[in-house]
Amino acid sequence: MKPIVQKLIDVLGPESVRSGDAIEPRYLGDWSGRSAVAPLAVVLPRTVSEVSDVLRLCNEAHQSVVPQGGMTGLAGGSIPSGKDVCISMERLVGIEELDRAAATMTVLAGTTLQTVQDAAQAAGFEFALDLGARGSCQIGGNLATNAGGIRVLQSGTAREQVLGLEAVLADGSVLSSMNKMVKNNTGYDLRNLFIGSEGTLGIITRAVLRLKPRRAARSTALCALNDYDGAVALLRALQSTFGDEIGAFEIMWPEFYDFGVSLTRSGQSPLGNAYPLYALIEQAGFSDDHGERFAAALNAQLEAGVVLNAVVAQSQAETQALWAIREATAELPVKLEPINFDVSLPIGEIGHFVDACRRDFRARWPTHHGVYFGHIGDSNLHVTLDARSIPGVTVEEVDRALYGMVRDYKGSISAEHGIGLLKRSFLGYSRSPAELACMRAIKHALDPRGILNPGKVLPAADNQEGI
Ligand SMILES: Cc1cc2nc3c(=O)[nH]c(=O)nc-3n(C[C@H](O)[C@H](O)[C@H](O)COP(=O)(O)OP(=O)(O)OC[C@H]3O[C@@H](n4cnc5c(N)ncnc54)[C@H](O)[C@@H]3O)c2cc1C
């Protein structure tokens, strides 16, 4: 046994340190599908002070560590190498306080998103962040990746749901910025350094989350559309009537929609015929008549010819059935051999970009099968290619083709999933050399020995595409 593992056992006790065959497979890999190897050890701290002890010992021993949340990430950020010690946050759980006056909830980082959502609901509030992995992903992981999800249009990304944060730095010191105030302009915003840093600058241990007033009810509609420009026109028309009551505006191109429908219980499209484009829209208001107003607005868009057909869910079961089509994303790794992309583009360009991808991929790989969907109100497009449809083509070839197009469109290679392992060598497609140098300087200042999640986010200096 390596001396560092024995030291960790001495401090945490044998029950909180796993090594060798005692490491369960769930600590080896996330949802990115990257092949997984067993780490040197997995530690399961129960308190912030234990997280601090682990980091102090590892820093002294120049031992690399990989923070692990719910392991639902799609960029490989929590995947260890055989030399790493994984720090699983799954035991650092609990809601410490719900402050009604401040409308905040203080939680430990290992608490799942679903637990936070349910507690907020029970107290008459709402926690705005929502995504398909809600039952497994943790608040710490959500913040470390600055997760987006389906309500960004209404409430912003994970970053906007946080007022205060506590993180343990590489040397074990605890940096507490557990601010509860909305306004606090006292120098650098340290909390935001850790949000989106994917475990490379510190381990998030606590957060003060913002709660929102609970909306009276939600209306959900599935609309058929002519084309992408019509989708943007519909989004803007609905927003001009309802403002931030439009909570979700999910666009599905037919390849994805058909996949989603094929997995539903009936296997039939709720809209009957096939259409060029589909929008799943959620409106959540505060007044009792908001559902009628939403239906009337959609009717007006039907009469204007922007919407070709629509169904509005009449019950919770119908709402769930409509969302099941969009949440078929969870089945992509089961039914396909997915090569996933999560990119950002200027909203007006997304339709052209999808057309360009189809053209480019058809020319390169005539047999390819791809699906397209996204939160277009947040400028976010997801593309998945089925590797089985392009035998002999490497993931790197597909990455280079797609990210090259993203660069040409002045987009971003990661909208919400982060950089992790999968995209690090393409970071230079979306960030300038000056920005990368600044990121390296911050990393060096906070983690001079480079023990925190090494090899994630920042590319090695000799492995930078396009720089
Ligand atoms: C079905 C499904 C749907 C999804 N939908 C969305 C979506 O709509 N929008 C979206 O943005 N993402 C989505 N995701 C991706 C994923 O759920 C999010 O990225 C989530 O925020 C990751 O949380 P996690 O706890 O699982 O983190 P992990 O996967 O365990 O870790 C992710 C990264 O954060 C780091 N990390 C984890 N915990 C901490 C901590 N406490 N301190 C510091 N670093 C930490 C890890 O080292 C790693 O780099 C989806 C995933 C699935 C499987």
Image (cartoon, helix red, strand yellow):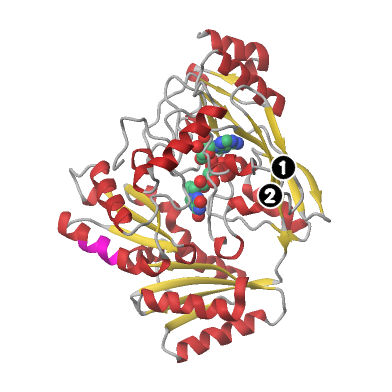
| Neighbours of disc 2 within 10 Å: few (<14), some (14-19), many (20+) | many
Residue matched to label 1: 107
| Neighbours of disc 1 within 10 Å: few (<14), some (14-19), many (20+) | many
Find the magenta span and give its range: 354-359
The residues tagged by marks 2 and 1 sit, at their Cα atoms, a distance apart of 8 Å
Q: Which mark is first along the chain, 1 or 2?
A: 1
Would you place residue 404 above or below residue 12 in this image? below
Residue matched to label 2: 116
Query: Where is residue 84 shown, x and y percent of the image?
Result: 47, 22
Q: Main secondary structure of the magenta part?
A: helix
- Judged from the image, the secondary structure of the residue bearing numbered disc 1 is strand
Which residue type carries mark 1? Val
Does the magenta portion include 357? yes
Q: Is mark 1 within 8 Å of ligand 1?
A: no
Most distant residue in the bottom direction: 303
Which residue type carries mark 2? Val
| Residue occupying the point 55% across, 85% down | 297
| Residue occupying the point 54% across, 7% down | 3
